[in-house]
Image (cartoon, helix red, strand yellow):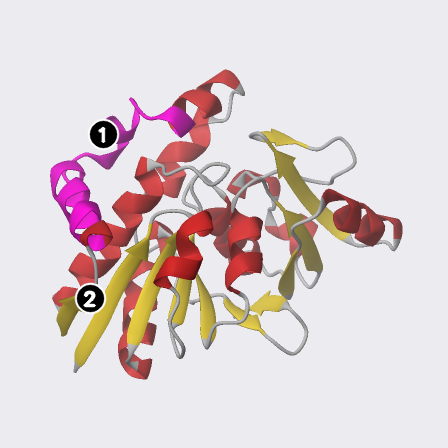
Amino acid sequence: MLMTVDVCPSPALYPYYEKEGDIVIVADIFRASTTICAMLQNGASAVIPVADIAEAQRYKSEGYRVGAERNARKCDFADGGNSPFDYPREKVEGKEVVFTTTNGTQAIEKARNCRQLFVGAFSNLQVLTEKCLSIGGRVVVICAGWQNKINIEDMLFGGAFAERLSEKSEITIDSDALRIALELWRKAKNNPLEYVKDTDHYRRLVVTGADGDVPYCLQSDTVHFVPCLDKADGKLKI
């Protein structure tokens, strides 16, 4: 099967990459997409992504469990922040978790009208590849970045995804952005943890004491499902 793949380096650029009928993968490796996968793996029935802090606070007032992060720090009103370790099974099993973050949930909001929206992380890379192959067509990875700026870790994921897909199918590279992502991944893949230690977001996580999340976020194929946005109710589900 011939597939077309592209990487959108920032949510702000999505209008220039968007085409009708796309599958969109939102990738926020440090840390929202990784954390969403962790929530669902630990038994959450759904994740409700919201872009706005006020909306998350409204859900909290209605009794929902809420995860909220801004600028790499947990919001005071929330039950958890943006760490995958904030959502163990005993806290989320059987529950819907409302989730808002600086970058990842904003990217989901931008792309929610696409044909199908998946959440991608290194943790579900293999099953995500298989899912996209089963559907076919054009796939765009939206890198959540940082406040609409490009970051390295999400571009690395885009390159890793395209490489994994190319091992199973012939792919058409749809822009230089994907060529850049592939080049970055080829340089980093033997030791991605060491590669990201000189990046902006890694340094932010060091400042906030959250750099211990990074090795977890770079582990591949620990999750065997793909979170998909249900357009009917706006919830991410398995």
The furthest residue to the top: 207
Q: Mark 1 points at which residue?
A: 195
Q: Where is residue 45 in the image (x, y as percent from the top left)?
A: 64, 66
Q: Where is residue 59 in the image (x, y as percent from the top left)?
A: 81, 53
Image height check: is 13 above or below 115?
above
Name the kind of residue labelled 2 in the image. Leu
Looking at the figure, which quarter contains the N terminus? bottom left
Name the kind of residue labelled 1 in the image. Tyr
Q: Position of residue 176 (x, y in %)?
A: 18, 52
Q: Mark 2 points at which residue?
A: 165
Residue at point 60% right, 43% down?
101
Residue at point 53% right, 58% down?
110
> Is residue 201 among the parts visible in the rendering?
yes
Q: Judge whether residue 59 is colored magenta.
A: no
Q: Which is nearer the eye, 22 or 89?
A: 22
As helix, strand or loop, the secondary structure at mark 1 comes to: helix
Task: Tell me which corner region of the image, top left, top right, bottom left or bottom right, holds residue 224.
Answer: bottom left
Q: Give the range drawn in magenta.
A: 178-201
Position of 27 with respect to 86 (left or right) is left
Image height check: is 109 above or below 34?
below
> Is residue 26 among the parts visible in the rendering?
no
